[in-house]
Amino acid sequence: MAAGRGCGVSDAHRNDEVHRLLRWYPKGWRERYGDELAALVEDTTGGGPPPPALRRSLAWSGFGERLRSAGLVGEPVSPTGMGVGPWLVGCAWAAFVFAGLVFAKLAEHWDAATPTGSHTVPMVSFDAVEALAVLSALAIVVGVVAALPALVRLLAAGGWPALRTRVFVAIGLTVTTGLAVTGLALWAHRVSVHADGAPGGYQLVAMGVALLFAATLAGWSVVGVAVARRIELSPPLRRLVISCAGVVTLAMVGMTAAAATWWGALSKSAPWFLAGGRPGTAASPFDPTMVGTAVLMAVATLVAVYGTVQAARGWRAAGR
Amino acid sequence: MRSKLADVATTWTRPNDPPVLILTSLAAGNKHGYALAQDIEGFAGVVLGPGTLYGAITRLEERGLIEPVGASGRRRPYRLTAAGRASLAEALEDMRRVTDEGTARLRTGRARTVEPRWRPAGGAV
């Protein structure tokens, strides 16, 4: 059945090449299907080196299997487990909090800088953001408290070794990000005092810190997904956690809409405020920081919606 | 709770979907990965890459529609299970209904009177 060998490539080298490609797949999948897929690749290529299209295809399929094994796509991993949906909502909320902090800083003293007659819409929308932020934080606290006993049970039952590496990586990223943010804050103070506009080097470092922050969020997301896949919740607690995820998601949708409304109102009545200019001067309302913040809010909200849908699907698949 | 079979039947609607092709190929006998790919290319003219093929094999085995034959090995064959056979029959029946309807509409230029294939849960239409 196998096609002919050849092409002057040694068996050992060929095997290495194929097994390198299989690293795209999760370990559990490789243990079950790795040898069979390697044999199929060898048969398909006639023993020659895998062509670029085949490499891309395997990389894509392997990445898909990783997402699937993490429970991020496809059918729920376990009908009785919590599933990763609520945790995705939690990760999205963490990213949203970061965007919210930037938004709060940008909006500082907006009411003092805008004409008195055009306060109503931005004030209502800003108050809505604040109220929904409190609501979402409460829902997160309730969800975490509900899931905590299951996490303690998991650790008591010897679940720590499976989480250890991920937790240490996440802690390492958190510490590195904390140090980087501190360094950047000190530098920012000097830049604001001595320079007219941030130098290119500063902006590059700031971008690096933002990437580190994203990596930290990703690190804790990996921990969360690993925990979520392992803990089991009773049906009432599971329903409570999923409900909390739904509340958080709705709050995020509301906050994004309210923040966009505030932005729109300020763009109309006081664009100079958004650009950091003097009152009455012409300015573009599309301040890069505000645009970035709005994009982050929107992306986080979409992830939360996806997480909630996944959670609801898991609930339905379990036949509750 | 929906059965795995119902999930499959409402998901596979195209004859070129890899799971349908694999089940169809295995309906004629047990095959390993490379033999499956060759057979499918032969009867359907569809080239399934190794990643796509094994992705579909994974899903089918998870759903209990196919199973490996014999001990583990590099070129282990797969076979249809009873559930896989029923699932394939159901999927083919769905396709046949569409084919028949399309053929009739092409011939007569209007829709036939047909029983609804799927009903909402609870029986109310």
Image (cartoon, rainbow, N blue to C red):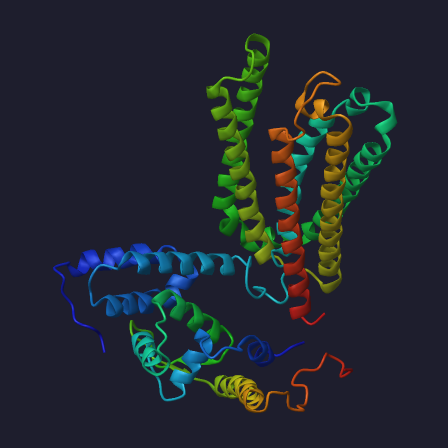
**Residue B52 picture quarter:** bottom left
Foreground of the two, B117 or A187: B117
**At 75% across and 17% down in the image, what residue appears?**
A279
Q: Is residue A63 left or right of residue A106?
A: left
Residue A275 in percent (x, y) is at 66, 23
Residue A238 in percent (x, y) is at 71, 59
Foreground of the two, A5 or A33: A5
Q: Is residue A57 visible?
A: yes
Q: Is residue B59 left or right of residue A32?
A: right
Q: Is residue A232 visible?
A: no
Q: Quadrant of the N terminus of chain B?
A: bottom right
**At 73% across and 34% down in the image, what residue appears?**
A263
Spot the residue most to the top.
A194
Would you place residue A25 above or below residue B12 in this image? Answer: above
Would you place residue B86 above or below residue A49 in this image? Answer: below
Spot the residue most to the front.
B109
Would you place residue A247 above or below residue A217 in this image? Answer: below
Would you place residue A152 above or below residue B10 in this image? Answer: above
**Residue A71 picture quarter:** bottom right
**At 73% across and 31% down in the image, what residue appears?**
A267
Foreground of the two, B59 or B109: B109
Q: Is residue A266 left or right of residue B19?
A: right
**At 56% across and 75% down in the image, what residue appears?**
B11
**Total number of numbered labels?**
0
Q: Quadrant of the C terminus of chain B?
A: bottom right
Residue A280 in percent (x, y) is at 75, 18
